[in-house]
Structures are given as C-alpha cells and as structure tokens.
Amino acid sequence: MRSWGGAALAALLLSGCASVTRGTTENISIASTPSGAKADVSGTEAPFSCVTPCVVEVNRNADITVSLSKEGYEPQIIPLTREISGSGGAGFAGNLLLGGVVGMGVDAATGAAMDHKPNPVVVTLQPVAPAPAAVAPVVRHRKPRVPVS
C-alpha cells in the first residue's frame, strides 16, 4: 500500500501544466550547408537575424518562418509548424490533476504544450545556376569564287 501512496505523491509532484513544466518558449537551432548563411526569423515579437549555425529563442505559440540566404545560392523559406509534443501533452494532461480548467486555458493560450517542427532546421543551399554565356554568332568565311572562262 505504501508503494501506491508514494507513486501517487510522485505523480502529483511531477505532473502539472505544460506552461510550468516546459515553459512558454523554446530554442530553435538553425544550420545550413554551407554555413554562414543569413537566417531571418519572422513571427517573433521583433524580427531577428543570425548567421548559421545559430540558435534562436521563440514563443511556443508563434507562427515562425525561417528565410535563409547567402550570396551565390538560391534563397530558401522554411515555415515551421506547431505540434503537440509528448512531454507537452503530458503536461497538458497534468491539468486534469492539478491545474484544472484554468491550467488548460493557460496552456492553450501560451502554446506551452506545442513544439515547432522541424527543429533543428537544417537546409542545404543550392548554388545559383550560372547565367548562360553569350554566344557570339558564328561567321563563316568563304573563299571568293573565281569565274571560270
């Protein structure tokens, strides 16, 4: 009986709303091949830029888009999606024991149960196709015709 009491106590202490157990922000890692690309992150309170590889901290409820650019390479735009993670779902479910409706409302408003995907953001930049070289017109020289008499 003691083991059940200890397990119940541990469940109560370790469960809780996702905003408490996970926080309302997360780190997004951004990398590119080749490195040294400019990463513009939109969807944050203020637009943010960094040079790859880098890590940015974003709100879990934000709609994030990462735009990568580097001279000589095609730009890439990567929209991130939000999904309920395993630990976020467990924290959200913990509201049934401790947080109640208020905890569920806080988690829903802050997106605390969500994670952005993909994370890490890893992009292979493609080189810009070289412009076709201007082709000079082919001039053929003919021997002059000599009249036959």
Image (tube, helix red, strand yellow):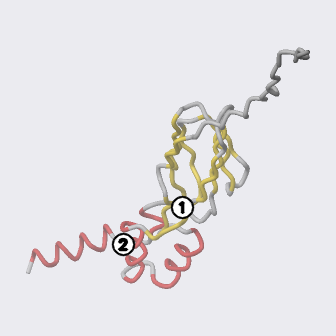
Which of the 4 image quarters holds residue 111? bottom right
Q: Which of 118 and 71 is in front in this view?
A: 71
Q: How many numbered discs sit on the rendered protein?
A: 2
Q: Position of residue 66 (x, y in %)?
A: 62, 51
Query: What residue is drawn where x is 65% and y is 48%?
Result: 67
Q: Where is residue 26 in the image (x, y as percent from the top left)?
A: 51, 54
Q: Position of residue 45 (x, y in %)?
A: 71, 55
- Answer with left or right where residue 86 lies relative to residue 11: right
Mark earlier in primary sequence (1, 2): 1
Q: Which mark is residue 75?
A: none
Q: Distance between the residues labelled 1 and 2?
A: 15 Å
SS at badge 2: helix
Q: Give the quadrant of the N terminus.
A: bottom left
Q: Nearer the viewer, residue 89 or 34?
A: 34
Q: Give the quadrant of the C terminus.
A: top right
Which of the 4 image quarters holds residue 98? bottom left
Query: What residue is drawn where x is 38% and y is 76%?
Result: 94
Which of the 4 image quarters holds residue 69? top right
Residue ID for mark 2? 90
SS at badge 1: loop
Q: How crowded is mark 1: few (under 14 residues within 10 Å), some or many (20 or more)?
A: many
Residue 51 sits above or below residue 62 on the image? above
Query: What residue is drawn where x is 36% and y is 68%?
Result: 86
Residue ID for mark 1? 24
Query: What residue is drawn where x is 66% and y is 37%?
Result: 128
Residue 53 sits above or below residue 77 on the image? above
